[in-house]
Structures are given as C-alpha cells and as structure tokens.
Image (tube, helix red, strand yellow):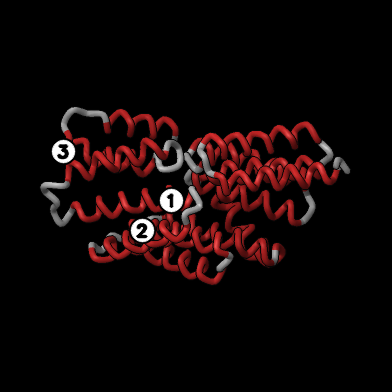
C-alpha cells in the first residue's frame, strides 16, 4: 500500500491537469490521514480546476472532496461539521448513483456515531455501507463494515462476537486487503484482551499497528499503539508499555489530533496506577 500511495502521488504530479485529475482525487483521498495538509491542498487544486467547467460527472469528484474534508474535521474532533459535510457528500453520491461513495460516507458517519456513543446509529450506517458496497460489488468495503460491526459487538459481549465472527475472520484473514487485515487483527487483539489473554492480544495488535500504518489508517494505528501499551502493562513489561504509549502520543501530537492523544494518555495513567506511582 505504501508503494501504491507513492505511485498515486507520482501520477498526480503530471503536467496535464485534465489527465492527472483522477490521480489528484485519489491522492486527496489516500492522504487524508497520512498527510491531511497535502489532502486539503490537493482538494483546493481540484476545486480550482473545476470551478469554470463542472460537468455532471464532476459532481462525484466534488463530493469526494467534501468527504476528504469531512474526515479531516472528524480527526480534529469537529464532529458536527464533519457530519454535515459527510451527509452533504452522501446526498451528492446518491444523486449520481455512486455506490462506493455512499458506502464511504456511511463508514465515516458510523465512526462519528461511535464518538457520540450512539452505537445504534453506528450499526445502521454500517449496514447501509454493506448494502451500497454490495451494489458496487466491492468486497473490501463490505469487509470493512463487517469488521466494524464485529468490533462493536465484541465490546458489548466478546463471547457472542467470537462465536459469530471468529471462524469467518480466520478464513478471510490470509487473502484480505491489508487495510481489512489491520482491522481484523485489531478485532482479534481486542477480543483476546477482553478475555485477559494479553500475550495473544499484543501479538495481534502489533500486526494491526503495522498494517494500519502501512495502509494510511493513522487513527487506528494510534489506537492500536495505546492498546499495545495497555497489553504490555498487563504483562508487566513496563518498558514496552511505556514505549508504545509514547509512540501513540507522539503520533497524535504530530498530526495535531488532540482528542486522539487522550487514548495513550489514558493508558499511561492506568499503567502508572498499576505501578502505584503517585
């Protein structure tokens, strides 16, 4: 995936603006977490190119740009603005029968719902994502939504979640898209932690971290780093615990995602409490 991203970046730098437009759209999309500043500047370039000649086909491009902006606002904890932009993009994709775009908008709206603590709304958006991904015959997007549903179910009832999804994910894991594998590994890691099997948990979470980082899922990488800190803390490997918590904190600071910095801070606080440090 990192090699693919570099190729997209190279394609987007071509001199022919019209020919490079699809590559610029792809660059904005794939850099939304890797390099939000690059994503926003690319969106500005796309809009400048389209301002004088927007065709019907270009409406979906502008909707994709809105979705990029929506996700960056979500990462900055501007949830209300993010939801407004995501819903606007969803309306545009629906008017163009753009099933992949609709699926992506529902994915973002599901994650915004999680931040609000509205898990019923999350489930609705993830189910709609599956429906649109099926229309698009897009297996990867279906898997993203399914793993999202499984992760939430594990937090409510880990035994039920394992009974429903373990065999399914074990079969899918070897051939899944790396981004999907990252999420599946994070699910296995979370389930193991919830069952106090911390050795198994950190094994899966380290895979999840590397895969999330390589596929540009930086937010998930930060969460995985925080959870690894907690896992190593429970294994009494205090240096590894602090290293992973620090890694998550540095990433959150690097990207200026203040709300995400709370996760490694929280895990660090739990770690120090275990050590009875005041």
Q: Are marks 1 and 2 in contact (CB under 8 Å)?
A: yes
Image quadrant where one finds the C terminus:
top right
Q: x, y percentage for residue 81?
A: 41, 58
Which residue has dot 1 on it?
73
* SS assignment at label 3: helix
Q: Are marks 3 and 2 in contact (CB under 8 Å)?
A: no
Which residue has dot 3 on it?
18
Query: In the rendered view, would you say 250 is above or below 103?
Result: above
Q: Which mark is residue 85?
A: 2
Structural crowding at the residue carrying mark 2, measured as other residues with C-alpha within 10 Å and reported as few (<14), some (14–19) or many (≥20)? many
Exactly how many numbered labels are in the figure? 3
Query: In the rendered view, would you say 263 is above or below 18?
Result: below
* SS assignment at label 1: helix
* SS assignment at label 2: helix
User: Which quadrant of the view contains residue 248?
Assistant: top right
Find the distance from the CA under tag 3 to the CA under tag 1.
28 Å
Query: In the rendered view, would you say 79 is above or below 123?
Result: above
Structural crowding at the residue carrying mark 1, measured as other residues with C-alpha within 10 Å and reported as few (<14), some (14–19) or many (≥20)? some
Find the distance from the CA under tag 1 to the CA under tag 2.
9 Å
Residue drawn at x 58%, y 58% is 168
Query: In the rendered view, would you say 111 is above or below 253?
Result: below
Camera-nearest label, 3 or 1: 1
């Amino acid at each position: 995936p990192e090699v693919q991203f570099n190729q997209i970046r190279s394609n987007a730098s071509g001199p022919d603006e019209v020919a490079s437009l699809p590559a610029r759209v792809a660059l904005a999309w794939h850099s939304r977490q890797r390099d939000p500043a690059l994503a926003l500047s690319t969106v500005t370039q796309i809009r400048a190119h389209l301002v004088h000649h927007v065709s019907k086909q270009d409406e979906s491009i502008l909707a994709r740009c809105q979705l990029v902006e929506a996700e960056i606002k979500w990462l900055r904890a501007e949830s209300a603005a993010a939801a407004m932009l995501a819903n606007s993009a969803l309306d545009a994709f629906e008017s163009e029968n753009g099933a992949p775009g609709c699926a992506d908008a529902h994915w973002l709206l599901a994650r915004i719902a999680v931040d609000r603590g509205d898990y019923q709304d999350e489930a609705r958006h993830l189910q709609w994502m599956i429906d649109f991904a099926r229309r698009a015959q897009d297996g990867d997007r279906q898997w993203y939504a399914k793993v999202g549903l499984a992760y939430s179910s594990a937090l409510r009832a880990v035994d039920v979640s394992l009974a429903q999804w373990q065999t399914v994910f074990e079969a899918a894991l070897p051939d899944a898209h790396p981004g999907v594998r990252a999420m599946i590994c994070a699910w296995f890691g979370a389930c193991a932690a919830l069952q106090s099997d911390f050795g198994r948990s950190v094994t899966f979470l380290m895979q999840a971290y590397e895969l999330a980082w390589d596929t540009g899922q930086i937010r998930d990488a930060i969460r995985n780093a925080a959870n690894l800190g907690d896992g190593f803390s429970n294994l009494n490997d205090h240096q590894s615990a602090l290293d992973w918590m620090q890694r998550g904190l540095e990433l959150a600071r690097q990207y200026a995602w203040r709300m995400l910095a709370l996760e490694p801070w929280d895990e660090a606080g739990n770690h120090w409490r275990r050590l009875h440090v005041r």
